[in-house]
Image (cartoon, coloured by chain):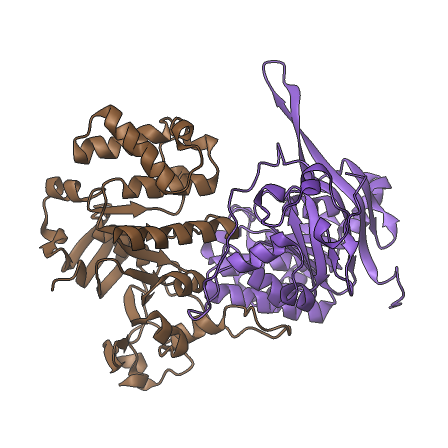
Amino acid sequence: MAQNGNASELVVLKKVKKHYPVTGGVFRRQVGTVKAVDGVSLAIRRGETLGLVGESGCGKSTLGRVILRLERPTSGSILYDGRDILALSRDEMRPLRRKMQIIFQDPYSSLNPRQTVGRIISEGLVIHGVGTPEERMDRVRYLMNVVGLRPEHINRYPHEFSGGQRQRIGIARALALQPELIICDEPVSALDVSIQAQVINLLMDLQEEFQLTYLFVSHDLSVVRHISDRVAVMYLGRIVELADKKELYRNPLHPYTQALLEAAPLPDPDRKKERKGLTGDLPSPLNPPSGCHFHPRCPKAMEQCRKSVPVLKEKGDRHWVRCFLYGDEVDESL
Amino acid sequence: MTKLLEVQNLKTYFFTDRGVAKAVDDVSFSLDTGKTLCVVGESGCGKSVTALSIMRLIPEPPGRIVGGRILFEGTDLVALPESRMRSIRGNKISMIFQEPMTSLNPVFRVGDQIAEVLELHENMKKADAMDRAVELLRMVGIPSPESRVRDYPHQMSGGMRQRVMIAMALACNPKLIIADEPTTALDVTIQAQILELMEELSRTTGTAILLITHDLGVVAETAEHVVVMYAGRVVEEAPVRELFHDPLHPYTRGLMRSIPSMSEDDKTRLEVIPGVVPSLLALPVGCKFNDRCRHAFDRCLAEEPPLTTPKEGHSVRCWLFH
């Protein structure tokens, strides 16, 4: 694999926006816009795990769905392996869909309760016309084995499995078509601690075995730290910080990242509890604050934070931050 | 001195068509005034059923408290008639649930819901109760409580709704608050605010808190004393520092090692507890953890270990320490 600049980047997002109109009143007129994703530029490198952290409503799941073109962005471009996927027709998109898969958070609602495990895992193979029925079932048995399920359970239904096992079914389904990219949308959030660890290990093993690229979307900072190579922090539709994992956790620059790290409870009773703590609630994405969205909760907010949006700029070694504390440049595109 | 709450050999069973599920089986612990006790465990370990047993809110049938005593200020709640229990519930003992949206009534204003508690238990007049509701909302940190008191639950965010739940729980100055996963549905920054609020309130009002959680991070930050449950039993009990510094039970150790660390940078494999939590209808013979334990030996398969106290104030249910 060529390791020069662009070839190492599997997905490149440029100024991607996803805005949802909000309608109200008797005539369903548009009364507002939710800017779920607001001008995100980001690259996911081949073979890496990019962690995407943020609180509820920050747009992290929407961003994942936009990359898969499950949602069409309002503007911006998405290059997959150098091709602009927004310019592709449905038919042209289809072969690409095999290469990108998604694992969902809720192992209870993301599997069809009326289909057997064999049918669920093989569905992608059927749709893309891969192999004969026997070959497909062989592949399903192989995949079940890979993700740690017993292949003889191929004819069972989802309700016969525990939460952790269901998540394994979801992972096997995602692997069926030999994808390159897997969007993991909070894949372990609904699982018990001891089961979480099993699934995280499995995802890491699979990445090595099949050279997978992950976008790992989560609100859990310790899980993201464990699995990621780089981490992006999102707040109300915008990336506010992006850096290599070590750098981000050791030297968080954005006040929001600092607050997030401070707020996360650690399993260490000796840790000094000197939380300054964030005050205030997450603002509504329907009516976000002006300027830097974080300014009403930011302990270091200045006059200009209320008026304009800082640009996401590189501060130090591959460490990007969107904050006026580190420079005065204004992002004119927002 | 009598303890505020003493749970002694509590047994709560559920009688189902497929057999008897012993959700809580011989659980004992106690809690002093002004202290915080955490009960930690994974889903199905019996921690919520323990909480509901104390509140006497076990759906009956299929459930029933079949044994043991729950002494609250010396009175056995298990033996209390429902009418007397009703005067304790929401008054001397109140409860905060995980999901603030489903535990508030969506068609009543939050102020009315708080005032209802006061009218019922304190015989307050409506107007006085509303004034007190405003005061309580201010106490739990809701901005402009005078107008917020007229909000409906859907007009508030998750964190605010949980604050309303706490205000309601505090309304009658309870001796004990039982909080069942109070921050699990909340975002990290909001979770930190709520935990801080609960800690502060317990400090200023002297209310004891029984906190039920699955999150060892939350335990480390809030508890003074910890009870670890597995398959309906207490498997370990210790003061919080002692538990984190020297966990004894293989299950507790496994749990602690399976959390991703915030101080390691390398992508290492996490240590895992193999297998899954056993079904309460088909528990293994002997120690209930024996099928997932790497230290299990023949005695563990044959006989269930009793809770012993190998170190002062630190008890564990494991043959390794016998």
- Residue B85 seen: yes
**A121 with respect to A40 (left or right):** left
B66 or A129, nearer to the observer: B66
B174 or B43, nearer to the observer: B174
Quadrant housing the C terminus of chain A:
top right
**B175 with respect to A235 (left or right):** left
Instruction: Find residue A175 and report its horizontal and vertical position in percent.
Output: 68, 59
Q: Residue at x 17, y 44 (%)?
A: B88
Instruction: Find residue A327 and report its horizontal and vertical position in percent.
Output: 77, 52
Quarter of the image for residue B22 reads bottom left
Q: Colour of chain B?
A: brown
B217 or A116, nearer to the observer: B217
**B270 with respect to B213 (left or right):** right
Q: Is residue B185 above or below residue A34?
A: below
Please identify the residue farthest to the front as the structure is shown. Answer: A303
Instruction: Find residue B270 and report its horizontal and vertical position in percent.
Output: 55, 73
**A189 with respect to B25 (left or right):** right
- Residue B18 seen: no
Quadrant housing the N terminus of chain A:
bottom right
Q: Colour of chain A?
A: purple
